[in-house]
Amino acid sequence: MQNMILAVMYSDKGLYNKVKSILIGRFGDIKAESSEYDFDRFTHFYEKEMGKNLVKRFLAFNRDITKQELVGIKKQTTDIEKEFSEEGKRRINLDPGYVNERELVLASFKTGTNYKEELGEGVYAHRVLEFKDGKTVMFWHTFPDYRVKENQGFFIEK
């Protein structure tokens, strides 16, 4: 089993708090919450859709999940994103996944080559980090903000 985590990106703190309450209702209590960080310093990929001044944080839930459960969780978080969208643009981005002693995996609708595992219903497991022999291993496809030691530390502690 793996511990459920969620990466949350937003610019409106009030919206974040509202969505956080919904997430707790759906997925249970949060056992750890990272500090928010300036996401714009890593990429401007989401700027056209979500605007500027984006911040991101991680949540670890008091819930163990199987890899297969990511399919339903990804669909639920996508529904929440859509619920709070305006004119077809997301105001909050929710990336569910899990962490265990070996790896950090995020659920994605984006296909990949040899680094993503198809779980079903268009959902893929994207292995972002590996934990091996007390070290964090990154891949060429590891997102820039997951390469930062402070963020990696959050997952190692979970």
Image: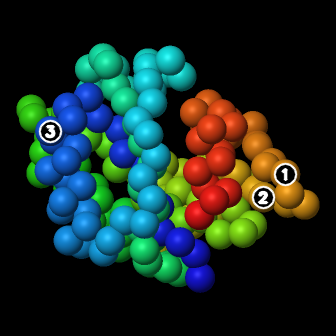
Residue highlighted by disc 1: 135
Answer few, some or many: residues within 10 Å of disc 3's Cα (few below 14, many 20 plus, some between 14 and 19): few
Coordinates of residue 104 in the picture (x, y in percent) = 63, 58
Indicate left or right for 68 with 117 as reference.
left
Nearest to the observer: residue 13 or residue 90? 13
Q: Which residue type carries mark 3?
A: Gly
Quadrant of the rendered structure where residue 70 is?
Answer: bottom left
Indicate left or right for 7 with 93 as reference.
right
Q: Callout 3: helix, strand or loop?
A: helix
Coordinates of residue 52 in the picture (x, y in percent) = 30, 17
Q: Which residue type carries mark 1?
A: Lys
Q: What mark, if any, has residue 14 been given in the picture? A: 3
Residue name at image x 22 percent, y 44 percent: 16
Indicate left or right for 42 with 88 as reference.
right
54 shown above or below 124 = above
Measure how far apart labels 2 and 3 are at the Cα level.
Answer: 34 Å
90 shown above or below 21 = above
98 shown above or below 82 = below
